[in-house]
Image (tube, rainbow, N blue to C red):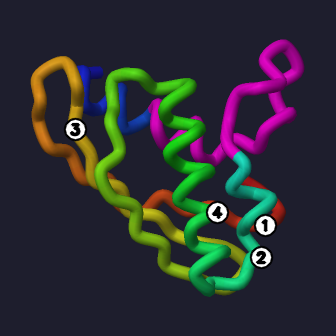
Amino acid sequence: MDDLAHLSQSIRDILTTPLGSRVLLRDYGSRLFELVDSAMNGGGVVAIYQAVVTALAVWEPRFSVQNVQVTPGVGGISLSLTGIYKPNGQMLKLSGIDVSGGTS
């Protein structure tokens, strides 16, 4: 697996893992599952942005988030991220990161 594919897999795993769900690594993951049913108003969207940026800042130091787009769906949200792959400064866009209320 090349570096960008590994990065993409890592970001998806972090964002689709609920906090507290890993037995030996309780702080791993994101708060997105708590926010899936939030109102998609200014406050709800900001909370989702914050959850994404915080989780990736802690668990994926190779990626710097520049933009987060949230698309609400039935029972979940879909995220598209734009950011910089820090090792080489390349701009990277990831889309179709789906987070649903019940499962990852």
Magenta-colored stretch includes residue 18: yes
CB under 8 Å between discs 4 and 2: no
Q: Residue furthest top?
A: 24
Name the residue that disc number 1 marks: 101
- Highlighted range, magenta: 10-30
Label 2 vs label 1, nearer the camera: 2
Q: Residue at x 33, y 23 (%)?
A: 62
Residue type (three-letter) at the residue carrying disc 2 = Asp
Label 1 vs label 3, nearer the camera: 3
Mark 4 vs mark 2: which is more N-terminal? 2
Q: Residue at x 86, y 33 (%)?
A: 20
Mark 2 vs mark 3: which is more N-terminal? 2
Residue type (three-letter) at the residue carrying disc 4 = Ala
Name the residue that disc number 3 marks: 84
Residue type (three-letter) at the residue carrying disc 3 = Ile
Mark 2 vs mark 1: which is more N-terminal? 2
Query: How far apart, in angstroms, are the residues tagged by discs 3 and 4?
Result: 22 Å
Query: How far apart, in angstroms, are the residues tagged by discs 1 and 3?
Result: 29 Å
Name the residue that disc number 4 marks: 47
On screen, 79 above or below 73?
above
- What is the crowding at mark 2: few (fewer than 14 residues within 10 Å), some, or many (at least 20)? some
Label 3 vs label 4, nearer the camera: 4
Quadrant location, the N terminus: top left
Residue type (three-letter) at the residue carrying disc 1 = Gly
On screen, 54 above or below 28?
below
Magenta-colored stretch includes residue 41: no
